[in-house]
């Protein structure tokens, strides 16, 4: 199968809200083909998530998947800190996201986590992004069946990142700007406490 290229930052499709998939398209070959193409592009990259606008399709479709192989560079302690755990393929269409366990106003930062993340559409860089720790997503699969998923830790981060794509938002809109690192430099920070990177970079 000839796979489409991943669209890079600067392309307008990444900056506009994606259209919901209309009811009549569920269960169609066309929608299933879009999903299987997205899964193939994500796995080939390889990445842990992909949104349809990243292959130039302005539709509310996201796919996500994480595996042992993709997290093999992280130590058990780093995995635990991030809440990074493998999960099987998820296909979510027309998703809505809800934050679980909203932080009480007297505890700023509660229920949030800050780590380096990157994006296949912004290759070569990573930055610190604060995300909610626990979210619930609901939407539909390609057959129009309801999908609901409560995600915590890294899966919740991936989910927020991909849903952002459907709103025309990239992680660079949310990043702590002074933390922007080339991948080479980010590699050195990933094994160290985030506080150390923040102090050294003046974040
Ligand atoms: Co992305």
Image: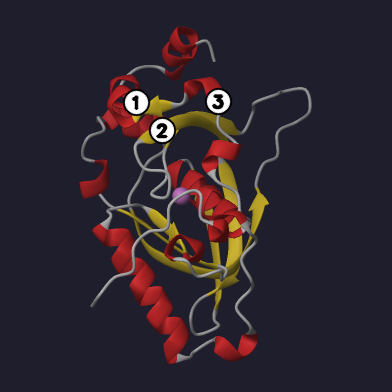
The C terminus sits in image quarter? top right
Find residue 6 and report its image quarter: bottom left
Determine the CA span between mark 3 and mark 2: 10 Å
Residue denoted by label 2? 126
Residue denoted by label 1? 186
SS for dot 2: strand
Q: Residues within 10 Å of mark 2 (few under 14, many from 20)?
A: many
Evaluate whether residue 200 shows in this view. Answer: yes
| Residue 41 horizontal side relative to residue 199, left or right | left
SS for dot 3: helix
Label 3 or label 2, whichever comes before in sequence order:
2
Evaluate whether residue 132 shows in this view. Answer: no
Determine the CA span between mark 2 and mark 1: 6 Å
Q: Which residue is at a point 57% across and 44% down the rendered structure image?
A: 134
What x and y, as percent, mark residue 199?
48, 8
Question: CB atoms at circles 2 and 1 under 8 Å apart?
Answer: yes
Label 2 or label 1, whichever comes before in sequence order:
2
Find residue 126 and report its image quarter: top left
């Amino acid at each position: 199968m000839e796979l489409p290229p991943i669209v890079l930052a600067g392309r307008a499709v990444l900056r506009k809200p994606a259209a919901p998939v209309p009811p009549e398209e569920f269960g169609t070959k066309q929608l299933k083909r879009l999903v299987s193409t997205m899964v193939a592009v994500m796995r080939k990259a390889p990445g842990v998530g992909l949104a349809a606008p990243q292959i130039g399709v302005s539709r509310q479709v996201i796919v996500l998947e994480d595996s042992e192989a993709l997290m093999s560079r992280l130590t058990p302690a780093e995995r635990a800190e991030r809440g990074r755990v493998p999960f099987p393929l998820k296909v979510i269409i027309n998703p809505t996201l809800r934050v679980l366990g909203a932080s009480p106003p007297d505890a700023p930062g509660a229920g949030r986590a800050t780590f380096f993340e990157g994006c296949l559409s912004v290759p070569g860089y990573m930055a610190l992004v604060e995300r909610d720790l626990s979210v619930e997503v609901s939407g539909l699969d390609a057959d129009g069946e309801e999908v609901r998923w409560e995600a915590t830790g890294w899966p919740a981060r991936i989910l927020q990142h991909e849903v952002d794509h459907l709103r025309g938002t990239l992680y660079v809109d949310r990043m702590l700007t002074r933390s922007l690192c080339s991948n080479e430099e980010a590699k050195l920070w990933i094994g160290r406490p985030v506080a150390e990177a923040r102090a050294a970079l003046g974040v």
